[in-house]
Amino acid sequence: MKFLFDENLSPRLVGEVATHWPDSTHVEAVGLRGAGDEIIWRYAHTHGFTIVSKDDDFRSLALVRGAPPKIVWLQIGNSTTSQVAQLLRAFTLELQAFSLDPAESLLSLKGPQ
């Protein structure tokens, strides 16, 4: 599994989770800063990424369209980059199972509010 972090998350997340998900990137790193959800969706689909976002629009797209790409929707409120990385690492097993399940398109992770 490799993540494409949405712009509502810090680009520093890529380094924070590199030991678990080394092929991850951020929308900014691939020239998609400010791009619409549809463009990000297509990029993730074409390049085999799972989108990680706090944006409810991606949750809605996942429910309507299904996968790919898969969406990890973070329900975390205002959190530091380290807290987001810690949340992802805490759910490593669930993320692995999610990536292997062809029927699932959305995984919602809740953290401290």
Image (cartoon, helix red, strand yellow):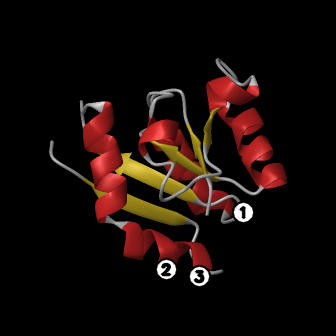
**Between disc 3 and disc 1, whose residue precedes?**
1
Which residue sits at x=68%, y=53%?
49
Q: Which mark is residue 97?
A: 2
Neighbour tally class for label 2: few under 14, some 14-19, many 20 plus, Cα within 10 Å: few
Q: Which residue is mark 1?
A: 68
Residue at far right of view: 46
Amino acid beneath label 1? Pro
At x 58% / y 72%, what residue is drawn? 99
Q: In screen coordinates, is 41 left or right of 24?
A: right
Q: Quadrant of residue 6?
A: top right
The CA distance from mark 2 to mark 1 is: 15 Å
- Disc 3: CA contacts within 10 A as few (<14), some (14-19) or many (>=20): few
Residue type indicated by callout 2: Ala
- Give the residue at mark 3: 101
Q: Secondary structure at mark 1?
A: loop
Q: Residue at x 71, y 37 (%)?
A: 40
Marks 2 and 3: in contact by CB < 8 Å? yes
CB contact under 8 Å: marks 3 and 1:
no
User: Depth check: 66 or 76 in front?
Assistant: 76
Q: Residue 30 in the image: x percent, y percent?
A: 74, 29
- Going from N to C along the chain, the mark reached first, 2 or 1, is 1
Q: Position of residue 67 (x, y in %)?
A: 68, 65
Number of numbered discs on residues: 3
Looking at this rendering, what residue extends furthest in the left direction? 113
